[in-house]
Image (cartoon, rainbow, N blue to C red):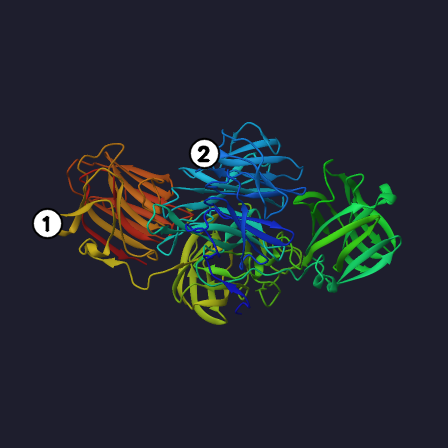
Amino acid sequence: MNPTNTYKNPFSLKEEWPFGAADPNILRFNGRYYLYVTSGRGIKAWSSDDLVNWTYEDFVSKDPDANNVWDPGVTYHNGQFYMYPAVNNGNNHYLFKSESPLGPFTRQSENFSQLKIDSNVFIDDDGKWYMIHAGGKGIIGRPMSDSLTIGPEKQLNAYLNWWTEGPSMFKRNGIYYLLYTGNHYLSKGYRVDYSVSKDGPIGKYTQHTDYTLLLSTKDDLNGLGNAMVTIGPDLDSYYVVYHNLVGKRPGSNGVVRKANIDRIVFNGEKMSVTGPTNFIQEAPKKADFYTWLDSTEGQQFFQKEAIGKGLMITSKEASKENFVAEYNFKGQTVSEHGTGAWLGMMFSYKDKKNYAYISIDPAAKTISLKHMKGGAASQIGEPVKLSADTDFSKLHTIRVEKNDNEVHIYIDGMKKVQGKLPIGGGAIGYVYEGMEPVFSYTAFSNDVNGSSDFEVFKTVPGTIQAVHFMKEENRGYFAQGAAAGENPYRTGEKVHIREGGDGGYAAELKQSGDWLSYKVNVKKSGLYGLDLAMGKLAKAAAVELFLDGKSVGKFEIHAHAADMKEAWIKQTIGKMQLKQGFHQLEIKLVKGGITFRSMELFEASDEKAQMANALGDLSKVTMHGTWNPIANGATSVISQDDKDVKLYIGHDGWTNYEIEADVTVKAPNAASGGGILFRATNESQYPAQVQDSMMGYYLSIHSNKLALKKLNYGSEHAASANVKVEAGQSNKVKIRAQGNRISVFWNDMKTPVIEYSDANAWTHGKIGLRSNVAGFEAVHLNVRSID
């Protein structure tokens, strides 16, 4: 089960800047990767074939205007490399240009003075350019009529309740994905999220709020930001590159940040990261077949033969039925052939009379999908016109995605052709006539459309998409009564899958004995809690989990209450001991039936939340801001100023508990006061950041009112109740957090003043206090676990 090749974040790059590798940007070009980072004087670059082993390539620009370059993303188009960094501490934007990814990049324009920092360029399938950059209320998008002319700004739905920056964009299966970073760059809660659009690069975006893409506030991993996504070396996987905050640079006011990569996985239109990580991971896999044909050693993997007036070059290895293939080429037309010159990229090659190919007519500037069957060529659909300025003397990339009978064709990242073609696998290669082409990186992978996501190790702690079980019946799954081709996601496999209603898919275990198995990578040995995001259960069910075939727990799942109206409900179903390292985790149905979208494994506590007078030993309390014991001893504290001060007690893995306290607000009013935090995780504290920088719940005490808020680096009103609150008077408050239900009791009331159910609940976390007035005090803060 252990992978052959591994890596560990963060990377230490040879000759990286004294402040590390902030704002990492990766360009994938001709089968290799090029890394550019925020720099000092001049721009440095590193190259890699595998995203893990990086070679320092020296300065790629020493242009005098390349001073203090921020977020230097590079875009390739038609033989030219374009870079639009913010320079001179972000006050200026210039276009830098080169004919090589290794430079030299030289300035081509005057200052784009109207832009904010972090500019990146995206080119859509129709060849239109767009610029995205930071703005005061989130990410801004602008159309571009050419590489130097930008149109009016459009505010995009990409905002993280504070300064939002570091945008990047990519397109997959017709969906536009926009990544962005929010919060203060020096806060632990610097984080990455994403929005999706189906109507264009600067169209209507929807934020995917189920999962923050990258967030960790742990001491050893925090301040995650400025992320971008690239296709992996296997041609099917996707990886996110980002930086983490290390700390202050000794002897300087500057900070040190490091570069990281982690795997992205997709479930329909939703994406998530198997991370963030700072422990041993499986390294990105290479394509099943790859070589650079313009190298001497690369040619040994192909065979050549004449065909008509041209030449055919075919690989000695063949792909399986479903695959991705990539071709990189350039070439001049031989003058005596004139308009008769053409070039084809072959796939599914059986023999000279049976194969498919992408035909390029360099004179007409067209691209076509064709099928050679029994020696007779037929065209699939109409030829597609390419841009008039397409220069075939420069390097271009063709990508073929063949999945079942569907074929999708891309040139230079732009989707141009698709069609139905009932063919299988086979060799890949080139066929041409009347040209002098140069062929370079050429490869295929036997995964397509994210099928490699099923075999990647999912990190624990972390969230696992239910539909990402391993391949093959009786290896990755067993589902009684399922027929091949009846599910909408993993067609051809005998498994129960249905649409999840959120852009993704859910898996079903219908009969006792059905099971699904996942590859997992456990960070450290210990106790882990298990949350399932399930379809509403009308009847009780039970599941058993196995690690490498050994049972780690059997768990009863109660039927959901009738008043839970939501279709999907997340709940903690139990805890289990897991061992560090790479394993196989199986979930097996024992009773009833369940449908689930995901399961989250989190570090749980092996001790109950059982603390009388939790404030009795302030050395065990994490404080932010000024809190002092009051005169009657260390079992009570009082806030000393009117800033947003907080304290935390306990463990992220605490789940169900009751909190009791006596609280006093010196001068409550409608806009300020104090209150109790619970199920709090991923907390961050910094003078300039999002006000509600944590995940969890907050019971806020206002003037004659209690307000329950759900916090997720922002505040969402959950419920409220009118109660009597007098300035300077002690009040008894009790909070019960049990499963999806939160109950709040006030003073001597026997029944709760607030009853709230959260289908997508925060299920675990610390307790704490919060105040934004001087004089908020808490006495006898107690917590005890409940079943």
Residue at 10% across / 49% down in the picture? 632
> Is residue 102 in sight in this rendering?
yes
7 vs 439, left or right, is left
Along the line of sight, the residue nearer the viewer: 148 or 456: 148
> Which is nearer the N-term, disc 2 or disc 1?
2
Which label sits on residue 381? none
**Would you identify the image quadrant in which residue 159 lies?**
top left
Q: Looking at the image, is 769 positioned above or below residue 592?
A: above
Please tell me whether mark 1 sits on a helix, a strand or a loop: loop
Along the line of sight, the residue nearer the viewer: 93 or 596: 93
x%, y% of residue 715? Answer: 36, 39
324 vs 255, left or right, is right
Mark 1 — residue? 632
Q: Looking at the image, is 510 positioned above or below residue 180?
A: below
Amino acid type at mark 2: Asn
Mark 2 — residue? 91
x%, y% of residue 787? Answer: 32, 59
x%, y% of residue 329? Answer: 72, 50
x%, y% of residue 189? Answer: 38, 47
Along the line of sight, the residue nearer the viewer: 474 or 559: 474
> Is residue 537 in sight in this rendering?
no
479 vs 736, left or right, is right
**Would you identify the image quadrant in which residue 131 lies?**
top right
